[in-house]
Amino acid sequence: MTDFSDLLDYSHSVAGGYVKSCGPIAALAGLKEFILNLGKTLPPEYREIKEGVWVHEQATIAPTAFIGAPAIICRGAEIRHCAFIRCSAIVGENCVVGNSTEIKNAVLFDGVQVPHYNYVGDSILGYKSHLGAGAITSNVKADKSPVCIGRGQDKICTGLKKLGAIVGDFVEVGCNCVLNPGTVIGRNTSVYPLTSLRGVYPAGSIVKATNEIVKRTNNG
């Protein structure tokens, strides 16, 4: 799991090739520069509404939303009332960024929904993943030490002091969950509300509690 090879369908993001080529961790570390370079090459359907912020003509931006540079907002995305896109963000096609949701140094693949009171920092959310109301990615450890991914001896030390979560395609995260620094969730996994996640979770699972994980069946 920690090689990330089965997490994401890279065809569902304007940053897919970039994330695939260097890996999610390095991609997040260099995201600001990537966005600034990519923005200059986007087709004319994207308008630079202010320096370093490119928005597709078919995206919807509420008047009360804030979008800081650099950022790319793709076709069909909906940025709702009081959304706060702080900086270094790619919001994919048909994404929803909702009321009081904050995005910082993150890639939202196409179809992602973070619609209610979410924080997504230093994270990648895969195709059609969804965070329930109040679910957040925690991106800094309490002791400010570098974030590691995994458990025990089977872990990757990233060297990054800020790293939230890497969430696979079609993941459903319940309301008021906390994805602690370095959390990785495999695709097609569902997480029950009020769960604190830490470490690596396999694809096709149901996480009922922090230490209660079952394999998904056809009927869920």
Image: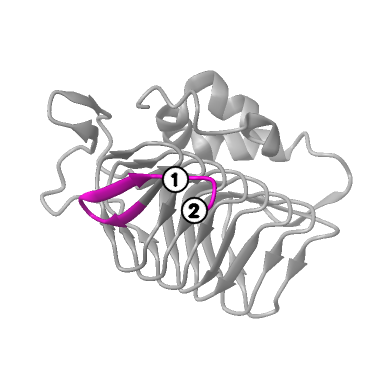
Give me the residue at 50% from left, 33% from top: 7
* Distance from the alpha carbon under mark 1 to that under mark 2: 6 Å
- Magenta segment, which residues? 207-220
Q: Circle 2 sits on which residue?
A: 220
Image location (x, y in percent) of residue 21: 55, 19
Foreground residue, 1 or 155?
1
Of all residues, the one furthest to the right in this rendering is: 44
Image location (x, y in percent) of residue 192: 37, 62
Q: Mark 2 falls on what kind of element?
A: loop
Q: What residue type is labelled 2?
A: Gly
Q: How crowded is mark 1: few (under 14 residues within 10 Å), some or many (20 or more)?
A: some
Give me the residue at 50% from left, 76% from top: 100
Q: Mark 1 falls on what kind of element?
A: loop
Q: In this view, does 80 lie to the left or right of 31?
A: right
Q: Does the magenta stretch include residue 27?
A: no
Q: Circle 1 sits on which residue?
A: 216
Foreground residue, 219 or 182?
219
Q: In this view, does 208 lie to the left or right of 169?
A: left
Q: What residue type is labelled 1?
A: Arg
Q: Is residue 123 left or right of residue 13?
A: left
